[in-house]
Image (tube, rainbow, N blue to C red):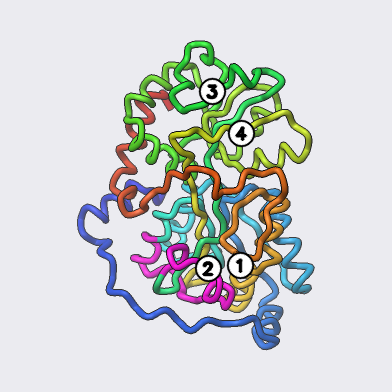
Amino acid sequence: MWTRTMAAALLAAGALATPASAQAPAPYQITPELEAAAKAEGKVVFYTATDVTVAEKLADLFKQTYPGIAVQVERAGSERVFQRIGQEYSTGIYSADVIETSDAVHFEYFKREGWLEPMVPQEVAEKWPADEKDPDGNFAAYRAHLSVLAYRTDLLPEAEAPKTWTDLLDPRFKGKMVKAHPGYSGTIMTATYVLSQLLGWEYFEKLGQQDVMQVQSSTEPPKKLAQGERTLEVDGNEYNIFRLQDEGQPIKIVYPAEGTPLAVGNAAVLKEAPNKNAAKLFYAFLFSKEAQQLNSDFGGLRSFHPDVKEKAGRTPISQIKLLHSDPVALEPEIETIKSNYEQYFGT
């Protein structure tokens, strides 16, 4: 099985040196000719780490917009998506057309390997911030979300709720928390890295003694809160909390003063995409105002599209102290993070 350990070994051996920068391709628009070519292929395969209900909703909008093109959504945690792409490109058996994960390190790695097809939708060229798109046109930030602390308001009064990350070490929260895993989720890998930089590994060592329920994906802690299995989530994606709040669940997000980890989900078209025209069309669609607005309204995701309007009642991202992760600095720390995490949490 292709793993990040293998990727790290190549990095250590110098096999993953970043190639010389190439000029990004000219931006492209969706044309009748592209639509016709995509419909002739009739299908696009989308590997994604976004919650499956959000990804399927997005696929439905694409099919309504471009009838005659099926969308095969393959949803898994970021690490599983990474492994599947590694397996496909090591065996030469290609299935995926477009990929998306919440771990920015993946795309730096895929770029170095030459597994991405550079292309720049017009929307990205004109409207995306420069630091949210690859300068060589290999990928761009399709979505962003936060890894948040949250709690059940019917099980924990606001006055007693944690206000900071270190509040979670209070003995009164022992056995009441749920947490996702950095070995499965790119969001949690990013969050674990930035919090270990901020608070030190001693924080996680003490947190591991708090009898924390361990799950895999960042989509799962919010669901455990909704089911009443735990009172607090240590981490988990913000967008699932937004959706649960919209459904009337008594859950509140805490944005600690120390900062909240930001996870960026890049998207790209693969070099060996079996359905190249459908992939090109779908990729451009992902960055359209309509798709980005759906992600915000239904999915609770943060968007870099300047024309997207956030729902009333949600804390604007401009009012939240964000903890940013540098994928270049994170990459050599991956195995240390996994090793420390296993030591402290026993999983």
Label 2 CA crowd tier, 10 Å (few <14, some 14–19, many 20+): some
Between disc 4 and disc 1, the foreground one is 4
Task: Tell me if residue 44 comes above or below residue 2 in the rendering.
Answer: below
- Residue indicated by mark 1: 287
279 relative to 184 in the view: left or right = right
277 relative to 105 in the view: left or right = right
- Residue indicated by mark 2: 128
23 relative to 79 in the view: left or right = left
Q: Earlier in the sequence, mark 4 or mark 1?
A: 4
* Quadrant including the C terminus: top left
Between disc 3 and disc 1, the foreground one is 3
- State how far apart marks 4 and 1 are (Cα): 27 Å
Disc sitting over residue 320 in the figure: none
Q: Residue furthest bottom?
A: 33
- Residue indicated by mark 3: 162
Amino acid at circle 2: Trp
Q: Which residues are magenta?
A: 108-134
Amino acid at circle 1: Phe
Label 3 CA crowd tier, 10 Å (few <14, some 14–19, many 20+): many
Amino acid at circle 4: Ile
Task: Tell me if residue 22 comes above or below residue 331 in the rendering.
Answer: below
Q: Image point 45% across, 75% down: which residue?
A: 118
- Residue indicated by mark 4: 253
Front-lying residue, 334 or 256: 256
Q: Earlier in the sequence, mark 3 or mark 1?
A: 3
Task: Tell me if residue 131 comes above or below residue 272 in the rendering.
Answer: above
Amino acid at circle 3: Pro
Mark 3: which secondary structure? loop
